[in-house]
Amino acid sequence: MIPGSNRDHPTFLRSFGYAFEGFRTAVTTERNIKVQLFVGVLAVIAGIVLKIDALSWVLVALCIGLVLFAELVNTSIEAIVDLATQELHPLAKRAKDIAAASVFTLSITAAIVGIIVFARALVLL
């Protein structure tokens, strides 16, 4: 049961439906997630072309997944802040800026991992 509600939890399959709906909403409404998906696709193509090893694939997949995860969390934090207040409040700005900084930090880290993985693959060619 959902706290404060008389409704039962959604079914397991319905929960997946909500997750896919959330992902689709983010992709159709958020520019940054489109950019991150595009960069992720480029990383996969580079991995295929360079024939990276299994461990490198794990690192690339983790980086892509973590960056997308961070962007989805950032987007949800921004939506919650917007719902809580329509005014320009210093704490609202702070929450949004810090959430955006988390995505930026993870993206830079993923880029460094990508440089290491793909530079190594190029050297081993």
Image: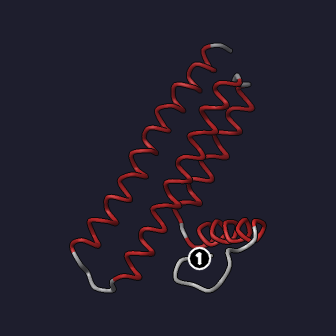
As drawn, 77 above or below 6: above
Residue at the image position 68 percent from the left and 71 percent from the top = 18
Residue 113 at what x, y percent from top left? 51, 31
Q: Secondary structure at mark 1?
A: loop
Query: Pointer 1: what residue?
Result: 2
Q: How is the image coloured?
A: secondary structure
Residue 71 at what x, y percent from top left? 50, 58
Residue 27 at what x, y percent from top left? 62, 66
Residue 114 at what x, y percent from top left? 54, 32
Asked which quadrant contains residue 69, the reply is: bottom right
Asked which quadrant contains residue 57, the reply is: top right
As drawn, 97 above or below 61: below
Nearest the eye: 12 or 46 = 12
Can you say which quadrant of the picture contains the C terminus? top right
Farthest left residue in view: 90
Nearest the eye: 78 or 104 = 78
Lateral position of residue 64 relative to residue 107, left or right: right
Residue at the image position 67 percent from the left and 74 percent from the top = 9
Residue at the image position 63 percent from the left and 76 percent from the top = 1
Nearest the eye: 15 or 29 = 15
Lateral position of residue 12 relative to residue 106, left or right: right
- The total number of labels drawn is 1
As drawn, 98 above or below 91: above
Q: Which amino acid, mark 1?
A: Ile
Farthest top residue in view: 124
Asked which quadrant contains residue 85, the reply is: bottom left
Mark 1: few, some, or many residues within 10 Å (few <14, many ≥20)?
few
